[in-house]
Image (cartoon, rainbow, N blue to C red):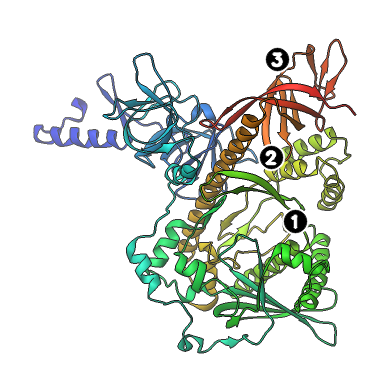
Amino acid sequence: MRKLHLPDEHKHVFKEVLRSLCQTNACKFFRGRYHPKKRNVDVVTGTISIHPRGFGFVSLDDPSLYDKDVFIPRHLTENAVDGDRVEVEINPFSHSEKGPEGKVHTVVERGRTHLAGIVHEFSRDGTALAYVPLLGVEHQVSIKSPDEKLHVGERVILEVLQWGDDKKETKTCLSHKIGHISDPSKDVIAAVKEYGLKKEFPEPVKKEAALFGKSVKQSELKDRQDFRSWEIFTIDPTTAKDFDDALSLSKDKTGNYHLGVHIADVSHYVKSDSALEKQARMRCNSTYFPGVCIPMLPPSLSENLCSLKPNVNRLTASVLMTFDSNGSLLNYRIVKGVIKSKKRFTYREAKEVLDGRKKSPFAPTLKLMEELCLLLKKKRYERGSLEFSIPELRVIVDENGTPTGTEFIPYDITHQLVEEFMLKANEVVATHLSKEGLDLTYRVHEEPSEERMNEFVSLANAFGFHLKEAPSPGDLQKFFDEALQTPYGTYLAISYIRRMKLAIYSPANIGHYGLALTHYCHFTSPIRRYVDLVIHRLLFEKPISYSEIEAVAKECSEKERISEKAERNVTLLKKLRLLKQMVDEEPKKEFEVVVTKIRSFGIYFEVDHLMLEGFLHVSELDDDYYRYDERSGRLKGSYTGVAFFAGDRFTVISKEIDLIVLEAKWKFKKKRKK
């Protein structure tokens, strides 16, 4: 500063400027000197999402800087946690097809002031230590001595006093308790707190929803096409209450099919800048837990006035499509309508009708739907789309949230026909809006990287299949058609899906790899997805700016991931509760498992009937000394010659079930005889 020869009256001001620059990280004060921050690498800002394994991805404030999120290795996340706004230094030598890589330089703004955790243990001096799922097992969290006594297993909301990292504890104080881990009725409440979900609706939102009444008014039918005399019905899960979509189908004398996909007209009720709209955008989507739904819209709309219930007038946005006898689209119309659904089918009931096990006046239409569905599927396969007929495992819970069992929901023809018709409606709407020259929220999906595809090919071949390198979509579909006929098919399909890149919303249309479509969007579920509501507005109201579309796409993609994490963790907890019930009733109960992955240090497997992942360290295989054969990918016993390989089966017994960290430990029992 002396070399600048500043007048005395300016020196004070200059020092204040330097201090201000330090506060904004533009320079640093070190050893009595101010040093400008080095800018020989790109420095960007964005919001970080932390994976359960510790690494993270930063979604940039300015997405135009890079075409992918920035990957942050686990050891370079510093003390950033999920949802923090961070400043990241890009590693200029790390760019690959996976995208840029960097390290967290500074946490600009914390994404939260409170954490949800569970009291895990007490230190020697009596300080309560909590396990916070958001931070992981290795991150120690201490709780400042509260006025009320704490117990191991209590679920707590903690106010952060000082952030730490893997080497330094995070210091907190107790905000409030939300029950004990042994109480399943609090599972969803805990998840709501942990993931920052919104459960209750503010009074202004509920009052606004109540203004619409409980039924459609005659005045609301003006300028709408009247479909109330048409044979229209819904097909949904048994537990569903929010019926977004209804179907109609007929076939004329020339062999053409006339398909109607009728979607709840949510945009009629949820207007731009209303309290309802702001709340829906804050939530972005409904979140579905076992036995509980946290809706995007108040129940008076989501379960009543917008839901396409039978025998009542309901407002719709309808896509009317005509297909020739081969399933090729001839023409379409998109109109506002009013329907009166004739029937509420469950998937199970519709399947019984198709199988001839139950009589119904709608049987001919269901048969016709099956016919058109198969034509559309054939065309989808021909263009390179993949389909995985994976049964869904549903955890059944009672009114208290206690799991009572599981149920596999088959991906049968009734599920397939609904999906095919929704896919086609979404494709038609996306293509239509694109032709109109409008910016929109596309649903896009990049193709998997070469590295990830090679990993999957190796896995498939380890299970005894023959999948060639760089398989075409046709090769993959042929493989899955064969694999899904075996006990390993579901696991392989899930493994492939996990290796694929995530589908996201974007204003930039790069196509949808999984569906092999050039144009695709989400239009068919506006009751439970905000982005669908935006598409409805684009169809019937004024255009939306690119910047606004970009913001919506980013927000909805992020909230979708958060909901998926919350749903996955609560479902895992319910599975572990069910496992604990089984073990409590029969302590030595044996569980059959299938090997999913072999490593030099142990075996990864999946427990049958629960779709629960497990791991056995090689030291747990105490009947022999096992060595890993890298060439064959097997663990082989030195004395017995017994080998473990991907797809192999054996039995285990439960050694420990930890509901706090969501982990089950196992003991090897015996290998299944062939």
Q: Is label 1 or label 2 in front?
A: 2
Identify the image quadrant of residue 38. top left
Q: Residue furthest left?
A: 9
Mark nearer the N terminus (3 vs 1): 1
Disc sitting over residue 619 in the figure: 3
Task: Choose between 575 and 542: the one closer to the eye.
Answer: 575
Three-letter code for the amino acid on which mark 1 is drawn: Tyr
Q: Is mark 2 on a helix, strand or loop?
A: loop
Identify the image quadrant of residue 193. top left
Q: Where is residue 626 in the image (x, y as percent from the top left)?
A: 79, 14
Q: Where is residue 216 in the image (x, y as percent from the top left)?
A: 48, 81
Relative placement, left or right, of 31 versus 136 is: left
Task: Choose between 231 and 13: the one closer to the eye.
Answer: 231
Spatial separation of the CA atoms under disc 1 and disc 2: 17 Å
Residue assigned mark 1: 411
Spatial separation of the CA atoms under disc 3 and disc 2: 25 Å
- Quadrant location, the N terminus: top left
Q: Residue at x 56, y 80 (%)?
A: 312
- Quadrant location, the C terminus: top right
Mark nearer the N terminus (3 vs 2): 2
Spatial separation of the CA atoms under disc 3 and disc 1: 39 Å
Disc sitting over residue 610 in the figure: 2
Q: Which residue is drawn at 82% across and 41% down?
A: 487
Relative placement, left or right, of 433 versus 322 is: left
